[in-house]
Image (cartoon, rainbow, N blue to C red):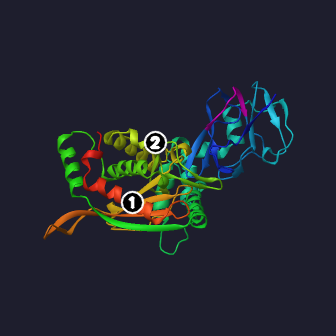
Amino acid sequence: MAIPITIPRLGWNMEEGTFAGWLKRDGDQVRSGEPLFALETEKATEEVEGLDAGFLRIPAGGPKPADRLTVGTVIGYIVATADESVSVASPLAGGAVTTEARRGLVPGSPASRERERPEQTRSSPRARRAARELGVDWATLAGSGKGGRVRERDVRAAAATTRHSGSLIPPTQTRRTIAARMMESLRTTAPVTLTTTADATNLVNLRNQLRSASDGAVPSYNDFLIKFAAIALIKHPVLAGRWTDDGIRLPAAIHIGVAVDTDVGLLVPVVRDVPSLGVRQLAAATSDLIGRARTGRLSAADMQGGCFTVSNLGAYGIDEFTPIINPPECAVLGVGRIAKRPAVVGDAIVARDQVTLSLTFDHRVVDGAPAARFLQTLAQALEDPSPWIVE
């Protein structure tokens, strides 16, 4: 009996994914729970585990890397014994399945594997994914791996040497996803942006104190902003709401997305239950997420469930900008650089560390005055941070 292997639904709104390659070969024996293939969804690549034990069969007409597949598509089978195979017109076309004894090549033998899936032996899954992202034809490369296998480093090196003026950069799947989500944001929200400037002098002093008193990692300014935003959302929960046809749905917990610049584009991993985290715990969580985002190790689940996003361009010398809402959230905070600027304190003009905060919100969900009060709360936290911080 052949048990079908299908494309799973890895997110609540997932309808299709990009096949990234088999992690096992035709004829391999597999155990329940072992990863069978990789699938790109949204901005992450997931390893999909098998539910059944047996032997993997990949029929003729099976998926190739970069194929777009809808949820539920049958791409292969698990059979009970090593001498069984499957015969099907095309699993992607939904043909009838029969099982038969294999003749000629020994299942799982090197010759059989090379004949059936040569592209899998000549390149790694990470190399094929990088090739799709960077627009490189990996089949033309001389690999540095064992037996000439093309590795991710080979693809990235080729991409770095072939970039030149006037060339066409084909959009990657990640770039297409980002573009689609940005257009969705503009089509489905009524965005308005409010901007204010906050005095960050006491925050700068607090961070310097933490740096001098600790041998470990020091929370970044962004970590503090995420923490302050979470507390402000508790006081102004409508900014964490979502527009639905039935009404404004408030979240059960405050999970905040962190915009991260990566080689493949902007990713937004989500920090869970931010109010419950001390600032050092928060720093550890964001450091882990950012590291995994930049090395391609985020899962789809890591980027789901956020109710608010923080985007910080201060490290690039940007003072202020208009962030775009990350749907289905209703608000996003843009953070500029912290810089010394003249400020009036009493009757004197003095240099103070200041930062510009830009809040873009969906006017369907919240009006200007409540959004302004949220920004006021956030600015107060920046100006007097100590009572808000739990290490």
Instruction: State the residue in front, 285 or 51.
Output: 285
Q: Residue at x 59, y 66 (%)?
A: 183
Looking at this rendering, what residue extends furthest in the front direction? 369
Helix, strand or loop at mark 1:
helix
Helix, strand or loop at mark 2:
loop
Mark 2 and mark 1: Cα distance apart in space: 24 Å
Residue at mark 1: 373
Instruction: State the residue in front, 375 or 298.
Output: 375
Looking at this rendering, what residue extends furthest in the bottom direction? 166
**Quarter of the image where the N terminus is located:** top right
User: Does the rendering let one see residue 156?
Assistant: yes
Residue at mark 2: 272
Looking at this rendering, what residue extends furthest in the left direction? 348
Above or below residue 181? Residue 54 is above
Q: Amino acid at mark 1?
A: Arg
Over which residues does the magenta segment extend? Answer: 48-56
Instruction: State the residue in front, 313 or 39.
Output: 313
In the rendered image, residue 344, in percent from the top left (x then y), is placed at 18, 69
Classed neighbour count for the residue bearing mark 1: other residues with Cα under 10 Å, few (<14), some (14–19), many (≥20):
some
Q: Quadrant of residue 46 in the image?
A: top right
